[in-house]
Amino acid sequence: MDPINKNEPTKTKADILIVDDTPDNLRLLNQILSQEYKVRLAPNGVIGLKAAFTAPPDVILLDIMMPGMNGYEVAEKLKADDKTKDIPILFISALDDTESKVRGFRAGAVDYVTKPFQEMEVLVRVKTHLSLRALYQQAQDEIKERIEKENQLHALLSAIPDIIYRVRKDGTILDFKTSSTGLLFAPPDRLIGSSITTLQNEQIGKNFLAKIEETLRSGEIQSLDFEENIGGTIHVLEARMKDSGPEEVIVIVRDVSERVRLEQMKSDFINRATHELRTPLTTMLLMIHLIDEGSTPEEQKEFWEILKTEIDRERTLVENFLQVGRLENKSFELKTAPIVLNDLLKKVIKQFVPVAREKNISIEFANPAESGLLDLIIQADESALTQVFVNLVSNAIKFSPVNGKITIQVQKKDQGVEISVADTGIGIPDSEIPLLFSRFFRAKNAVEKEIPGSGIGLFIVRSIVDLHKGKIEVRSELGKGSQFVVWLP
């Protein structure tokens, strides 16, 4: 006998589960199969089902006519479970009519072993389906491996910069690599052999050559930021250079427009947030000073009212900043419960009536009773949803002129409810609507008119609506007003 190769993996025997309520059948099938396979025996359908779920076998031989749970029922339950749905089932039966076989195949069987058993037939059928299952598993593994490789390749290509050049000291492009879908893709014959300075304007070209020379002289990585018009849009590009020989460098160019935009937005936000927080704080300190100095009872009352208003304003700002943090790090969780939507909207409107009155702005809430929506109940987080409509109504007042009008409507739509908040304000430029729900973003006309705001309210609104599996849309016309439409399931 040849010695066992200890480096060779030991082959595990295939596992066969036999389910039959006849002891003689179990004994005979065990005798036929146990020479080549690991065999487990189950005397009824319930025990067989439990054995299959606990440790899924490679093949199941299943009797049809059993008390309690017959073979058809067992097969259907096996096929309904992800762990056992791919296991080949061979029915054991003395029934040889077409109707029984068809019913068996519909229940999930792949073959039949008829009684009385023929040893060679049983072995051949079991072996055939083990081989077919092995081939099927191999094919599945290959498909999975191919998908994983394609995903890895896609991830790698996505991680590759927009373009990589190999450039000589004088600026001549020796080679380049890029994705065909990259922003800076160009055909090879257009780039190789030409000068990198001809791809940009004269000044940027000179800067490139100076950076290449500095890279070769110092041996340190040099970087250069520049702007380029691509498809009618100005992009900010970053070129990083590393020496790859005595007279050549590798130049990696990336589109960093989004990073630059976010950095600018963050910088603007910090400036705005500082201003927004400082303004009420300054007013509060002034009111405290005036109260301490002494004044008439009427003045004292007025100072206290202003002080309370500014404290509430400061609290709202701080809560909004904290809310953004919770939304961004995914720590905010909805606490949903049945709520009457119209009651929530009425409470929101009521708190803004005094503010609207100061600008003589009317707030019209379309009567929900007319459309049968008076007691409309939805499943939502009342506190979070209140925040959504507080932001929308507050913005509508803020951006509307004196004598303006705000209209709030509710209607059923697309297996949900649609809430519209429309104003007669300054409107939003079409080009800026897609950016409106970005954190820190503020419309240009709002900034120009020096309308106060932190640029995070609508980010919070969209985030909360998304958490409720809802949608929000904006319709706007410059100088005529805006309409925010929230749909909730």
Image: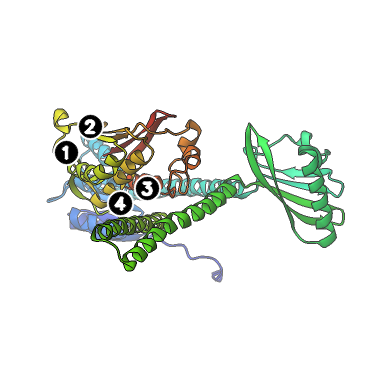
- Cβ atoms at labels 2 and 3 below 8 Å apart: no
Q: Which mark is residue 463?
A: 3
Q: Callout 2: helix, strand or loop?
A: strand
Q: Is residue 220 left or right of residue 23?
A: right
Measure how far apart labels 1 and 3 are at the Cα level.
23 Å
Q: Residue at x 26, y 34 (%)?
A: 362
Quadrant of the frame with the N terminus: bottom right
**Residue under label 2:** 412
Q: CA distance from mark 1 to mark 4?
A: 54 Å
Number of callouts in the render? 4
Above/below status of 36 relative to 181: below
Q: CA distance from mark 4 to mark 2?
A: 53 Å
Crowding at dot 2, Cα within 10 Å, few <14 / some 14-19 / many 20+, comes out as some
Viewer-proximal residue, 43 or 443?
Answer: 443
Pointer 3: residues within 10 angstroms few (<14), some, or many (20+)? some
Q: Which mark is residue 376?
A: 1
The residue that disc 4 covers is 60
Circles 4 and 3 in contact, beta carbons < 8 Å: no
